[in-house]
Image (cartoon, rainbow, N blue to C red):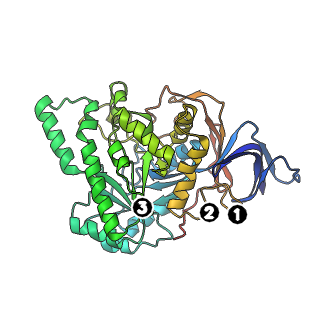
Amino acid sequence: MKTHLTNATIINEGKRFSGGVVIENDTIQTVYEGRPEFPSDGEMIDVAGKWLLPGVIDDHVHFREPGATGKAGIASESRAAVAGGVTSFMDMPNNTPPATTIERLEAKYARAAEVSLANYSFYLGAGNDNLAEIKKINPHTICGVKVFLGSSTGNMPVDDDKALAAIFEQSPVLIAAHCEDGSIIKNNLQNFIARFGEQLPPAYHALIRSEEACFRATGKALDLAVKYHSRLHILHLSTAHEVRNFPQEEHITAEICVHHLWFSDEDYDQLGNLIKCNPAIKTIDDCEALRKAVFSGQIAVVGSDHAPHLLQEKQQAYLQAPSGIPMVQHTLPAMLELCRRNFFTPELTAERMCHAPARLFSIKKRGFIREGYYADLVVVDPNSTYIVSKDNIHYKCGWSPFEGQPFHANVTHTFVNGHLAYHNGQFDDTRKGQRLYFER
């Protein structure tokens, strides 16, 4: 079975040109410029006036399964991902129980094979006492090891320095690190409560989970990576200080998340706990520095850190409300909206969200529009304005901090392994996504 995508504006590998793609089964058979004549076999899909990009690879999601399926799950959140043009995701291990053994990790893979509309991989969680499990990892089948360095959601910090050093020295795969210093955060929290009481407004989140807490922990991870020449990928940088001091080492990379490129502490008054996340959204100066780092290429990857919670949980007082934002459906539309505001370009968006994750994780035959690669593709109408509302949100939690926000570029088609999984608000889940493999 062949599918012909014709009259597209293809955005791929820094170029933009008119042409099309021929998909055969799960693979891109042909990429062409212009309008060649085709035989009549197969389905013709005319996407005139639309952009054709590689499917987004999101290196950082929390789909909450197992353990919190009342608020999210692999089935629901992979649908939301596909609706936003995300064709592959890498899910974090802070579940209940945490995915800190190969057996638990493989159970997540088995579940995804049954229900995930998108392609998938899962991180193994690091702990103080599971180095033996980490050393069992097959580098070709697992994306990486997640280390919570300091303080985070999920009660999985690696706080034993000897264990941490051993992980950096002996991990057979990329180490993805959440870096916030727990002692600094604890002291900040105690000081603010002592001064102002427990009814703190959400804006204090950026002061409690402070710039210092971030750069201290990031510096510790960088020192270990340099010492052991570890393959380190630091997640969700959130401060100007971190990007100013980020090393230019081939084996050390980083991610910035869309909410840190979009929001600042000026938005807490309006959105409150809806934008409470770890690390915290900080100042407009931090936001501008992060945008510049993405634009320049200093930071290679843009991800979502999709972390949904129920709305009633978020409506609690600041200290009780959990941290995390549902984002995976809206990362690509938000980035394209930032393009419209001249912060980025669509070509750069494809580089940061598609090409770079494929390269940095060595993902096999994904992330590019190339002949012989898997047909993970997204079609975007750049002139189709819609407003984010509960009627078009696909997260199981049913809300988004973008509600009421107009986006001027709309995902119309998403192909996963050549299968049209999403088209104009409708899903076809008769075929599931595939496990990601890595050429390491």
Q: In this view of the protein, can residue 53 be seen by the observer?
A: yes
Residue located at (67% from left, 56% from top): 375
- Separation (CA) of disc 1 from disc 3: 31 Å
- Depicted 199 relative to depicted 10: above or below: above
Dot 3 or dot 2, earlier in sequence: 3
Dot 2 or dot 1, earlier in sequence: 2
Q: Position of residue 136 (x, y in %)?
A: 39, 75
- Label ID, residue 356: none
SS class of the residue under badge 1? Answer: loop
According to the picture, the residue beneath numbered tag 3 turns out to be 249
- Label ID, residue 372: 1
- Amino acid at pointer 3: Glu
Q: Which quadrant would residue 148 be assigned to in this image? A: bottom left
- Depicted 284 relative to depicted 18: above or below: above
Q: Position of residue 271 (x, y in %)?
A: 37, 28
According to the picture, the residue beneath numbered tag 2 turns out to be 365
> Quarter holding the N terminus?
bottom right
Residue located at (36% from left, 47% from top): 244
SS class of the residue under badge 2? Answer: loop
